[in-house]
Amino acid sequence: MDNGSTPLTAIAESFEGLAKFVNSLKDSSQELRLDTLCEACSLVSVLFSSLGLAFKFAELEYVSKVRDLVEASKKYKTLHTILDADIANDTVKTPGSHSRNLRRVRQGLDLIRALFEQFMSTDEYSLREAASTAYTQVCAPYHSWAVRTAVSAGMYTLPTREQLLLKLNETNQSAEKKMRRYINASGPVIEYIDKLYISRKISLDW
């Protein structure tokens, strides 16, 4: 199987580039561009579509939020500027605001990170178990009972581990290497986004 150029390869490489940049930042005068983040986040969308009905909520929410941020990047150059604009307008947590959408996209990245960690924990771990654990850790605390119930029911429609690997054009070994690369690279990026809120005294419990 030729898995040199696959969705997982593109995602791993893109987030490694982001991680290298945020890790190199020396002071607050250097900032991550919004369009650069959006390019990397857009690549993750294919993972949600590969997971089928159970993660349809995540695909729909994630894709629409990334699309909003892509549009916002035409006006706002960096992540700092969208947060500062929403703070000035008192709309940080308002549904549809760029700051709220950035928060949801960040949760989507974290959900994939958690899913990959669970997926790699053992070869015997089913995708349904991995996805259920990842969802419970990352998204469930912020979702209504109705959404949690729908997601729980949808878990039974997830592809098997083998079917997912086939969709992504990966072997078990090649997928795990690239998943590990994403896990390692997404951590600094997620932390960077979180610090933008924390430094502005905005809690992360929403």
Image (spheres, rainbow, N blue to C red):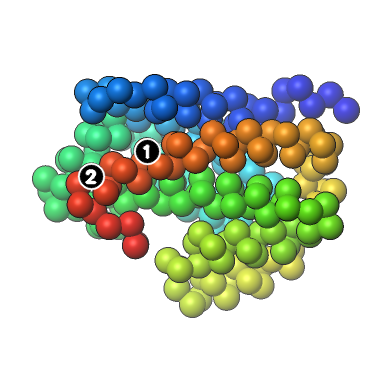
Left or right? Give the position of 70 relative to 198. right
Q: Nearer the viewer, residue 198 or 72?
A: 198
How far apart marks 2 and 1 lie (CA) works out to: 10 Å
Residue at image location 47% in from the left, 29% down from the top: 19
Which image quadrant is residue 45 in? top right
Residue at image location 16% in from the left, 47% down from the top: 87
Whole-percent x and y of residue 133?
63, 64
Residue at image location 22% in from the left, 23% down from the top: 29
Q: Which residue is mark 2?
A: 199
Looking at this rendering, what residue extends furthest in the right direction?
1
- Sequence-wise first label, 2 or 1: 1
Instruction: Reply above or below: 4 against 153.
Output: above
Residue 196 visible in image: yes
| Disc assigned to residue 192 | 1
Q: Amino acid at mark 1?
A: Tyr
Residue 68 visible in image: no
Q: Amino acid at mark 2?
A: Ser
Left or right? Give the position of 44 relative to 7. left
